[in-house]
């Protein structure tokens, strides 16, 4: 790597000669198609993004210049550079280089430099390397497998596959492209190709396979070379759900493009010359776990030497007989992210040791043992302990979630599983005799997204709730957004995703993660009555079109665009969004959506499943109005005025029907529960002259519950925004701060380290909820954390300027808080809002990134007594009880009279 780095630096120096940059302006965080690492960009016109770095205030970019060069593995140019003119523009996100057309499977380095409104000029940014994907080329490699059938709900050993090839000269660039029906660990000459896990991911295999590319130049040698892959069932074969499997035989396909110094490319591929054998992974399954027999190890298996396994010819399926689309992975990969060490160890039965990691987490245990050859060590995983102090596994349902290691008997042996994962806080270890001091540690595994948001306040209860939500996101952001990570489910439930995505997009840079998942959601689409987006994506056959679930197909693109400014997310979803609105509108000829009942306000406390009020029909009607409204806005954004008009007409008709059918003259709404009023207010379904009456009923429904919530999956995310918009942030704080059931802090009080699926997943009176479906790591109710960012601290993106180009900072003190702070790494750089209340004064510091502006809305009705950086506040306007001042980039400090709480 140092060689590559220094040559890249040389490339940079050569290209930057002759520029006289200003001292303070630089460009940072180069992203190609939104990614810091972009190995397989599947567009000939990739979009580039960067941010400005400067210490100065009020900085705006006035111009940019971009250039791209095809490079070899050492960063040397292989072709002439394509360079733009200096272009007058303040755009720094999703910018296309005119005249540059990427060629299939080539590798490029790009750079940008920028000028600002103070006469500053940056140097060229350090080159970011990106690889072009297939760009319409045919996949050149055949598919190989072991020819055996995986029966539904049965587990199998993983297959070890190997091939060889010869090199007469060492290439200047070698890129390996990998695809699989199943999951693979690719290697070249005995060395792993990547630290990525669960390669190449989980698409809807009925429609597409993902591929990924890796640079393997440094792994190749003159003469004989060997390459290999361990192939697991993963999400493809029959062990996921008893009735669900994509196909009976996992398969692998790969090729390496070898580029000579003169730019000539030759390709080696998987094919009939490959062999397969069984190796040490003797059982693999996402739900059931993994068994590894270390006695079977032979480290030569993927080297030229080959080793001594019983190699057999592979089964082959020609590339031309694979009809799925080959799709470049869009999301960053899953990786090992952090390690947790046990906080305690106890021998709970003779020879059985219980470890507590102190945190409900997702991943697996790294095992260290010293044991005799053939000794079997068993690891079981659980989120909770029973009253007997033993692990509680009833809530895993059909997932055995067990890892077994058979020792080879050679000193200290270390092992981690390959194709499974677990959701757990506790590990039960048996069969290891007296365990080593460091026998287990928790390896936290999730999609490797940048952490963008932080939040902290003076109330440790809320800090803990924030922490629990963060861990809910870590644990359920493993390749796709899942409902839960532990039981025999772990699916892309769309309702959970849509309620949580706003929160998730604050906490992590999840734009590409959702954009990739939206492929699966669109692939799930079913035409005709009862169709629409599926309730799970990838579709696992759990139904279509459920209100509040299938609406994810509309809500997630909107929310991801709002946070990232990436119009492509909307563009590519537009046809299916419009189709979904049409199907739902067909079910609502009179404006009321009549469709088969579905989940409704799922897990609303005190009700049986599917029976919670308000009626499913009311919920479906409210959601149709909401989705039609968002669809109309997205049609406008993508210049489709006729569709926008149609969606608006649907929205207006449904809204009118909602009022006719459900809204009484006195403001009462059918069902008369919190969720009835929340849907109506949050989705703007109430006429202005009855808004106050409806709000009064909402407040009554809280008062009747002693100011506790009484909502499920769909009502809960609307509580804080609806109460805040109604001018009752004080009540929102009261509901939030309840520590008694039902409420967010009830689980915190009872020791939760993640968000529970149910408000009463566990109570001191009943113990575990008896109804079975009982996850302790379900992020849906963590959607409240969006309010921490956008209201407590007050950082909020605006649809008028998506991607944080212009945004709002409207801090809202309240409840028992004396201080709060949120930071957010926006696409333009750090934004922050920090406030504290002291001696009757509110002190507020805000940070606005370069090249952006913000409306700072202070909780004060007039500018009297407000200072900005120590001087009386000058130009401001009063709006909805707040004093608003618009500022450009920089850090600013305000002081004002503390608002009444
Ligand atoms: C999942 C939920 C999901 C629901 C559908 C459950 O089994 O865990 O989170 O949204 O089914 O109602």
Image: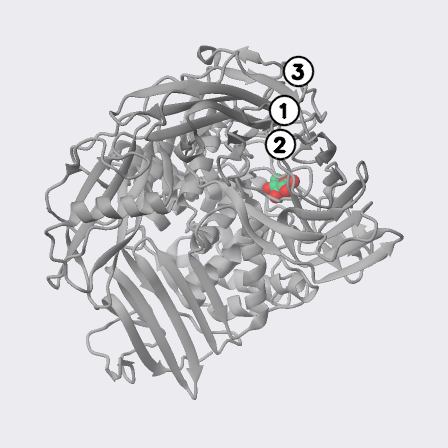
Element assignment for label 1: loop
Mark drawn on residue 299: 2
Cα–Cα span, label 3 and label 2: 25 Å
View extreme (right): residue: 350
Residue hosting label 1:
307
Query: Which label sits in the foreground, 3 or 2?
Result: 2
Say which quarter of the image contains residue 611.
top right
Q: Quadrant of ligand 1?
A: top right
- Residue found at x 50% / y 14%: 271
Q: Position of residue 177 (x, y in %)?
A: 43, 27
Query: Which label sits in the foreground, 3 or 1?
Result: 1
Residue hosting label 3:
148
Q: Residues within 10 Å of mark 2 (few under 14, many from 20)?
A: few
Comes first in the chain, label 1 or label 2: 2
Q: Are marks 1 and 2 in contact (CB under 8 Å)?
A: yes
- The reply to whether residue 794 is in sight is yes
Q: Position of residue 558 (x, y in %)?
A: 38, 44
Element assignment for label 2: loop
Q: Are marks 3 and 2 in contact (CB under 8 Å)?
A: no
Cα–Cα span, label 3 and label 1: 23 Å
Element assignment for label 3: loop
Establish if 627 lies above or below 875. above
Q: Residues within 10 Å of mark 3 (few under 14, many from 20)?
A: few
Establish if 342 lies above or below 611. below
| Left or right, 887 with reference to 353 | left
Q: Residues within 10 Å of mark 1 (few under 14, many from 20)?
A: some
| Left or right, 781 with reference to 520 | right
Foreground of the two, 848 or 273:
273
């Amino acid at each position: 790597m140092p060689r590559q780095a220094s040559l890249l630096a040389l490339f940079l120096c050569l290209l930057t000669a002759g520029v006289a940059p200003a001292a303070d302006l630089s460009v940072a965080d180069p992203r190609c198609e939104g990614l810091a690492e972009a190995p397989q960009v599947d567009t000939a016109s990739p979009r580039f993004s960067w941010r400005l770095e400067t210490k100065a205030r009020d900085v705006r970019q006035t111009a940019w210049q971009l250039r791209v060069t095809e490079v070899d593995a050492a960063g040397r140019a292989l072709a002439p550079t394509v360079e733009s003119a200096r272009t007058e523009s303040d755009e720094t996100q999703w910018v296309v280089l005119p005249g540059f057309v990427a060629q299939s499977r080539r590798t490029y380095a790009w750079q940008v430099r920028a000028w600002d409104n103070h006469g500053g000029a940056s140097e060229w940014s350090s080159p970011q390397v990106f690889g072009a994907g297939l760009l319409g080329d045919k996949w050149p490699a055949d598919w190989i497998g072991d020819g055996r059938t995986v029966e539904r709900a049965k587990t199998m050993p993983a297959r070890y596959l190997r091939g060889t090839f010869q090199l007469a000269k060492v290439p200047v660039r070698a890129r390996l492209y990998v695809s699989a029906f199943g999951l693979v660990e690719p290697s070249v000459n005995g060395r792993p190709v990547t630290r990525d896990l669960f390669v190449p991911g989980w698409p809807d295999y009925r429609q597409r396979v993902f591929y990924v590319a890796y640079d393997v130049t440094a792994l190749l040698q003159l003469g004989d070379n060997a390459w290999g892959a361990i192939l697991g069932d993963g999400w493809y074969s029959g062990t996921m759900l008893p009735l669900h499997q994509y196909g009976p035989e996992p398969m692998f396909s790969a090729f390496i493009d070898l580029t000579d110094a003169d730019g000539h490319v030759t390709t080696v591929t998987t094919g009939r010359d490959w062999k397969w054998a069984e190796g040490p992974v003797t059982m693999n399954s996402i739900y059931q776990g993994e068994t590894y027999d270390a006695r079977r190890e032979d480290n030569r298996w993927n080297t030229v030497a080959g080793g001594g396994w019983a190699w057999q010819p592979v089964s082959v399926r020609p590339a031309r007989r694979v009809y799925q689309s080959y799709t470049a992975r869009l999301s960053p990969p899953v990786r090992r992210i952090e390690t947790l060490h046990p906080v305690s160890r106890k021998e709970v039965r003779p020879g059985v040791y219980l470890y507590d990691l102190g945190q409900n987490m997702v991943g697996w245990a790294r095992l260290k043992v010293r044991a005799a050859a053939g000794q079997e060590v068993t690891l079981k995983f659980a989120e909770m302990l029973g009253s007997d102090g033993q692990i509680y596994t009833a809530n895993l349902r059909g997932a055995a979630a067990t890892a077994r290691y058979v020792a080879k008997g050679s000193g200290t042996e270390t092992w981690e599983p390959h194709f499974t994962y677990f959701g757990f806080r506790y590990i039960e270890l048996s069969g290891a005799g007296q365990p080593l001091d460091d026998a287990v540690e928790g390896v936290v595994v999730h999609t490797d997204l940048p952490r963008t948001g932080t939040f902290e306040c003076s109330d440790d209860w809320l800090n803990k709730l924030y922490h629990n939500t963060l861990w809910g996101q870590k644990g359920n952001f493993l390749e796709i957004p899942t409902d839960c990570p532990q039981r025999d489910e772990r699916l892309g439930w769309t309702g959970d995703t849509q309620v949580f995505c706003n929160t998730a997009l604050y906490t992590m840079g999840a734009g590409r993660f959702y954009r990739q998942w939206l492929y699966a959601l669109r692939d799930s689409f079913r035409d005709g009555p009862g169709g629409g987006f599926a309730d799970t994506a990838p579709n696992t056959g759990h139904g279509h079109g459920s209100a509040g679930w299938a609406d994810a197909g509309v809500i997630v693109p909107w929310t991801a665009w709002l946070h990232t400014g990436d119009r492509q997310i909307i563009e590519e979803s537009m046809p299916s969004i419009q189709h979904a609105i049409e199907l739902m509108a067909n079910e609502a000829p009179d404006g009321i959506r009549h469709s088969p009942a579905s989940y409704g306000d799922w897990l609303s406390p005190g009700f049986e499943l599917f029976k919670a009020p308000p009626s499913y029909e009311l919920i479906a009607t409210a959601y149709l109005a909401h989705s039609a409204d968002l669809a109309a806005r997205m049609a406008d954004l993508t210049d489709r005025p006729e569709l926008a008009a149609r969606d608006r007409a649907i929205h207006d008709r449904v809204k009118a029907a909602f009022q006719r059918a459900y809204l009484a003259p006195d403001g009462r709404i059918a069902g008369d529960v919190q969720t009835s009023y929340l849907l109506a207010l949050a989705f703007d379904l109430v006429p202005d002259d009855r808004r106050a009456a409806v709000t009064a009923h909402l407040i009554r429904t809280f008062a009747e519950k002693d100011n506790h919530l009484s909502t499920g999956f769909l009502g809960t995310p609307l509580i804080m925004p609806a109460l805040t918009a109604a001018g009752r942030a004080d009540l929102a704080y009261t509901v939030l701060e309840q520590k008694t059931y039902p409420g967010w802090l009830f689980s915190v009080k009872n020791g939760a380290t993640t968000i529970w699926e149910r408000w009463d997943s566990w109570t001191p009176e009943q113990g575990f909820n008896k109804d079975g479906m009982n996850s302790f790591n379900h992020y849906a109710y963590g959607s409240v954390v969006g309010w921490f960012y956008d209201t407590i601290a007050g950082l909020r993106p605006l649809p008028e300027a998506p991607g944080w180009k212009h945004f709002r900072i409207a801090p809202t003190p309240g409840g028992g808080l004396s201080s709060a702070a949120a930071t957010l790494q926006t696409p333009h750089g750090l934004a922050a809002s920090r406030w504290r209340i002291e001696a009757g004064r509110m002190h507020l510091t805000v940070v606005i990134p370069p090249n952006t502006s913000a409306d700072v809305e202070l909780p004060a009705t007039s500018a009297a007594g407000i200072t900005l950086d120590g001087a009386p506040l000058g130009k401001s306007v009063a709006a909805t009880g707040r004093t608003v001042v618009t500022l450009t980039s920089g850090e600013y400090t305000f002081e004002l009279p503390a608002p009444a709480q």
